[in-house]
Image (spheres, grey):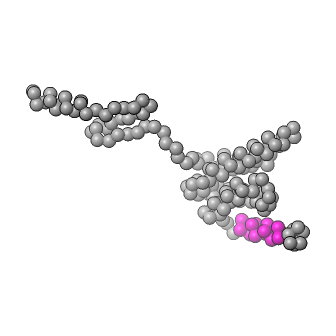
Amino acid sequence: MKRISSVLESSTDNKEPVLLGQTQKRASTGSMVLNLTPTQSEPLLVHAGAVISMLHLVPAVNLPTSPQLALDLQIHTCEVIRTLVRTERNQQVMCEAGLPHELLNHCSLSLTDEGHILHPPLQYMFERLAAQCLTPKDLRSVLKDNRTMLTLPHLTQL
């Protein structure tokens, strides 16, 4: 009996202190510590249609009484979509949903005009998605838009 009680006493003496705010659980074997604090990770897209709907709403944001607020909302929406397509998995999901085609259809003016306020986030999205997949039809559209941009009067005078 003495031997068993000494083992129990020695196992209870070696407990590690648990800091407040940290939740730790031991596995049934006592060999593994699980940290249950949430970790920061990239968002995981589940509904690509919701992201495409957000993109469709960007040009519809218009407040005649407060144009600066409308512009800020458009910029914020584009930045949210931009952060969603940061990971390769999300890029693949959005390519399958047709986001590159939607960008070309709904945001072509912003994509071709480098001075446009929405150009940087839209260009980032398009470049990331084009690296994953770009259909021949979309490639022709990009080339046609670039050709049109090169024939603009202000560029031919340079």
**Which residue is depicted at the point 62% across and 53% down?**
85
**Which residue is depicted at the point 27% across and 39% down?**
29
What's the magenta region?
137-151
- Would residue 152 appear left or right of 91 to someone viewing this image? right
Vertical side of 40 occupied by 116: above or below: below
- In the image, 154 versus 138, the foreground residue is 154
**Which residue is depicted at the point 82% across and 67% down?**
149
Residue 141 percent across, percent down from the top left = 76, 66
Say if residue 108 shows up in the picture: no
Residue 156 percent across, percent down from the top left = 87, 72
The number of callouts visible is 0
Q: Quadrant of the N terminus?
A: top left
Residue 52 percent across, percent down from the top left = 69, 50
Vertical side of 152 occupied by 16: above or below: above
- In the image, 100 versus 17, the foreground residue is 17
- Would residue 18 appear left or right of 59 to someone viewing this image? left
Is residue 17 rendered magenta in the image? no
**Which residue is depicted at the point 45% across and 37% down?**
37
Q: Quadrant of the C terminus?
A: bottom right
Question: What secondary structure is the magenta-colored segment mainly?
Answer: helix
